Image (cartoon, coloured by chain):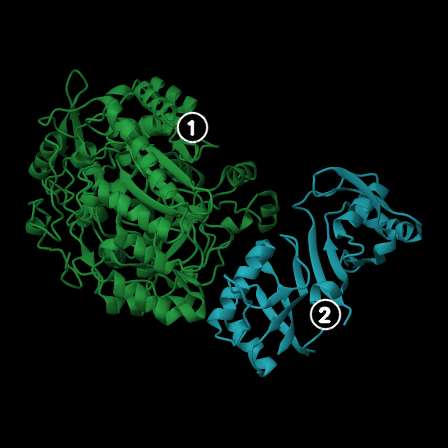
Chain colours: A green, B cyan
Amino acid sequence: MQEQHHILQDSKLANVHKPTRYIGNEINQIVKDPLQTEVRMAFAFPDVYDIGMSHLGSKILYHVVNRLEWASMERVYAPWPDYEALLRREEAVLTTLENKTPLCEFPLLGFTLQYELTYSNLVNILDLGRISLYAKDRLETEPIILAGGPGAFNPEPIADFLDLVVLGDGEEILPQLLHLYRNLQKKYQKRPPRQEFLMKAAEFDGVYVPAFYMPKYDEQHTFQGIERLVENAPMPVRRAIVKDLNQAEYPDALLLPYGEVIHDRAMIELFRGCTAGCRFCQAGCIYRPVRERSLETLLNQAKILIQSTGYDEISLISLSSMDYSQIESLVDTLLHDYGCQGVGVALPSLRVDSFSVDIAEKVQQVRKSGLTLAPEAGSQRLRNIINKRVSESQIMEAVSGAFDAGWSSLKLYFMLGLPGETDADLAEIIRLAERIAGVYRQKKRQGRLRISISVSTFVPKPHTPFQWMGQISPEEIRRRQQLLRSMIRDRAIELSTHDVNTSDLEALFSRGDRRLSAVIERAHELGARFDGWTEHFRFDLWKRAIEECGVDHRYYANHTKEITEVLPWEHLDSGVRKEWLVEQWDLALKELETDDCRFGPCSLCGVCMDYGVQNLLDKESNR
Amino acid sequence: MKLLLMFRKASALRWISHLDLIKVFEKALRRAELPIALSQGFNPRPKMSIALPLPVGTTSSGEYMELELEESMDPLLVVKKLNLQLPEGLHMMQVQVLPERGPAIMSVVDSSFYEIKIPLSEEETAKMGSVITTLQQKSEITVDYLNKEGRKKSMDIKPGVRSISWQMDTNKIEMHLETSSRLFVRPNYVLQAIAAEMYREEWKIDEMDIHRVRIVLHI
């Protein structure tokens, strides 16, 4: 028998700031009897409840697993520091919300890897859940640790903590893995040996078992590629792809969170994947091709969700919702069918053109909240380099339309530190904002104009055409941020930039390898938590951990790699071919654009050929 | 049609805030597909109000909600439909029809009954009866509290203490306190006075098990 762990008394919640993060008990929560459930899985979101409960992917997986009558999924979120302190003070174990089961008692525990700065929380959840941090140390009685999400495409910095990584779409592969577990459990009449489960699991497309591979380094400590330790382990590891989302499971009810969460509304997913081809964008590479849901499917899902949740707002989710082939019909029908019930439509992402502004105007007839557009770069030259196929006249047309529709508050997203960027390109950001202000003033509108320019720092991401590029140095980031700030003359223009140290740490993990797990373990030990939160981020702890582990931060973050260099994530196949990435890098250097293959010719990224898939649009586009 | 519903808030749901409670009810009313009257304006909301906020962590078996329907309906059916949509811990117990043109329920709150359990030593348990008698006989009970700006203030709660008693069989303190807009006496003010009378430090926030038995309305 396992040892009994102390579970926190309910009354102790009086000591924490937002107790509803830890009670569960939400409408549409699914609680199954542990004794009647053959395969129990815990699912951990390594950030606070307020963020985790806004995440659509988790809700899909929660539904997909819990609809299997023999399996269950229970949730846990990263404990906020006040709750962690309470758990440690009371020597209590971290449990799931549904059955308050200690994490260490589950046979399977899955994490979603949404962004690099949750890695210290991931380790903390293992620690508070009383689970051995390293996969190699785990006993047969301990859970098998799984991970998925975009971070799975370079899980190397945390690979030593994980038993199994899922690459790609999770809603089909996860039930298959649970089936496998169930069958083995039947055979053994108890928890099956983890090695046997992992061996069999690795046969599925989309499953990567880090322990089956070992990285090699030369005398200069340069990464030299990865070696298979197990004969049949796939090389490269292929990605799991759902070919037709109309056939895929989708929740018929969504958990209704307590407290103020980031996105508290019904959500339908219009499509997955994006072929716009922005060269900095990882999501635009790892989720190809575009797979749309049909208008009929979406309207049906919207109806079911509104009934089952009582939400008064429905959000249209995708990487670029304006590119949905039926966006107009969808928005019109939703407004027509639910407008009278007081149910609104929310569009999380707009394209920079007047078409998008027209649709945004339609859905925001009542409340005129701010309008957000993302030109990403100030100059046409740099927009060509990153393949953001938007012209200045399109931008001007879009904002002019927005001002005519009554908006006076605009938010513009840009990136700093893009490949080939010069000071002149940065000046173009300010000039663009000034021209936009000029358009507003020409119209002589009432109301004060506000243009907020949000400039984030570019982080090179694996599996993108910019994966070889190093990030500009922290000093250079600071200089360029100051330069931007010094160029602002117009009082209507506000600038916000990202924290330099945060971007520096992101760059370390983004293109990191297995040697970083020691850094993460050490930083956690020193107290690093919630690194994505300004109020908790302690760069000094990370610096100390990096130093103590003898890791060269500059090499990982700022070194531009040769095209011929082996990359630490090259054994993982995102679907796009290396030749395509090289070609895109080359075109970027030549400042040449590539078409979106939905509307133009195929650029041979390779995913359709190699995976037997294709862009699936509900309606032929007339663009 | 205006209805007055009495509800219970217990178990894990005691941790949800007043704002959350309203959100839970609004969504439950939508799901129950009841003919709820909506407020006018840009952001129409169901016409619903709650008599008195319940502090986070406190349970209750007698809270009140006022609800306006656009058309008449069997009040018991409203309760039935609504209860199907409420999370465990939240439950409608009673319903009555209110006159169309009555005062808002928030303005008719008079007082509340409480039952409180706190950890006590044997000695304290033995003393409790006499401590409470002493408090009852005092002409003034002055307690400290923090005002909205976080400044320390003191007030005499005696006029608002309708009764206090010690239940020896259950080890619970029962109180009936004025909770109106004129004078609002929180049960932890009384606990503070009890602690002072016993020459001990105040009970910690996670040691006080406070249950509101019911609110008394003046209608």
Chain letter belonging to callout 1: A
Position in image of residue A214 (x %, y %): 18, 31
- Is the residue marked by circle 2 packed among few (<14), some (14-19), or many (20+) residues within 10 Å? few
Image point (34%, 67%), residue name:
A334
Front residue of A621 and A456: A621
Depth check, mark 1 against mark 2: the one in front is 2
Position in image of residue A227 (x %, y %): 13, 32
Whether discs 1 and 2 lie on one chain: the answer is no
Pointers 1 and 2 in contact (CB under 8 A)? no
Image point (38%, 25%), residue name:
A485
- Can the viewer see residue A62 in this picture? no
The numbered dot on residue B103 is 2
Classify mark 2: helix, strand or loop.
loop
Image check: B196 left or right of A208? right
Q: What's the residue type where badge 1 is placed?
A: Glu
- Is the residue marked by circle 1 packed among few (<14), some (14-19), or many (20+) residues within 10 Å? some
Chain letter belonging to callout 2: B
The mark tally for this picture is 2
Q: What's the residue type where badge 2 is placed?
A: Pro
What residue did someone put label 1 on? A525
Position in image of residue A210 (x %, y %): 22, 38
The numbered dot on residue B29 is none
Image check: B139 left or right of A197? right
Q: Which quarter of the figure has residue B67? A: bottom right
> Where is A621 relative to A432, above or below?
below
Classify mark 1: helix, strand or loop.
helix
Q: In 3D space, how far apart are the residues under numbered discs 1 and 2 (Cα atoms)?
A: 59 Å
